[in-house]
Amino acid sequence: MTTDAAPRAIIHLDMDCFYAAIEVRDRPALRGKPVGVGGARDRRGVLTTCNYEARKFGVHSAMPTFMALQRCPSLIVLPTRFDVYRREAAVVREILHRFSPLVEPLSLDEAYLDVTAHPGAPGPLAEVIRDLIFQKTKLTSSAGIGPNKLIAKIASAMRKPNGQLEVTAAEVPGFMQDLPVREIWGIGEKTERRLEELGVKTCRELQRFSRPDLVDLFGKFGSELFDLCRGIDDRPVEPDRPRKSLSTEETFPSDLETLEQCEERLAELFQELMADLAQKETSRRVSKIFVKLKFADFSRTTAERAGLEPSLAGFRTLLAEAFARTGKKVRLIGVGVRFAETPAAELQMALL
């Protein structure tokens, strides 16, 4: 809900094709060529990211490598170097903290920054931040500036690569009008299709529905949609806090009927999980790994095992165990890890 408080000033900072940009920076001969980073050419894998030259061919992050090579045979696929990416991300993070203690990392290459308390105007601040990042890393970034996280993130995407866009609080109503509903966080393919069935493609069209109508259609999320389609987002920028688990999952267009079909999709999910793990949790000890299945009748089961390091073989064992419990068709597979709890003394030291 809106309040009478002065508008916040939020910057969403997004590095442009971060991993691929680092590879091209470190290998000047690759400049101008389509480059992907991630799964190797000779085995099953998925791309962690790719540069804009590759995206012209329809290649994108999280795409299976074999499919990316079909679309762009000249694609240069490089292995990930997360030690290098983490080092560069630390440089970027240090720059952000010069301007505010309220930095919320979303990944190595993306973060929110609350500069409400900074005496400088947020637009020029974003320009200074991006310039400092380029001076230190020779990497470009994009920024969105707005009164909340929703507007800031949408704005940054509109000016990629190497640009920025500021949307003031007064400009938000007009900014939202013709925005596709898919740009709103939380709206995926399924919700987008349902909205299309209702004749809704833009936020202007979604604003015609009352809050009770949207709650009837989408439950609790309907109330959030009522606010979000108007550019209202009260989520605070929260500094990074240790998470208890990390996972990734996929709901399939058609139910999977056999264990072999499930194993094929598991391999892709495993690659995505390992990429996320390397990006977001670099020093946490894994205490358990797990596989979650949702069946065609929406029942669920989870198989987990303690004391195992994440490996494709380990996840396959858990998948077979979970699948054998019912033999039903599978509509969703999730894979993840749970982290060991950080002792209070150790956590206190980390904060000093």
Image (tube, rainbow, N blue to C red):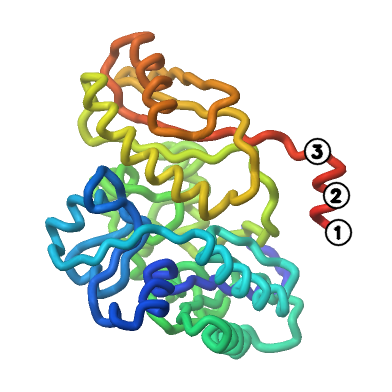
**Please, what is the three-letter code of the amino acid marked with disc 1?**
Leu
| C-alpha span from label 3 to label 1 | 15 Å
The residue that mark 2 highlights is 348
Question: Quick one: SS at disc 1?
Answer: loop
**Residue 186: horizontal and vertical position, in percent?**
44, 50
| C-alpha span from label 1 to label 2 | 7 Å
Earlier in the chain: of badge 2 and badge 3, it is: 3
**Residue 103: horizontal and vertical position, in percent?**
67, 66
Asked whether disc 3 touches disc 1, contact meaning CB atoms under 8 Å apart, the reply is: no
The residue that mark 1 highlights is 352
**Please, what is the three-letter code of the amino acid marked with disc 3?**
Pro
- Residue at x 41% of width, y 58% of height: 80
**Please, what is the three-letter code of the amino acid marked with disc 2?**
Gln
| C-alpha span from label 2 to label 3 | 9 Å
The quarter in which the C terminus is drawn is: bottom right
| Visible residue check, residue 180 | yes
In which quarter of the view is residue 350 placed?
bottom right
Asked whether disc 1 touches disc 2, contact meaning CB atoms under 8 Å apart, the reply is: yes
Q: Nearer the viewer, residue 22 or 175?
A: 22
- Residue at x 42% of width, y 83% of height: 162
* Mark 3 residue crowding within 10 angstroms, few (<14) / some (14–19) / many (20+): few
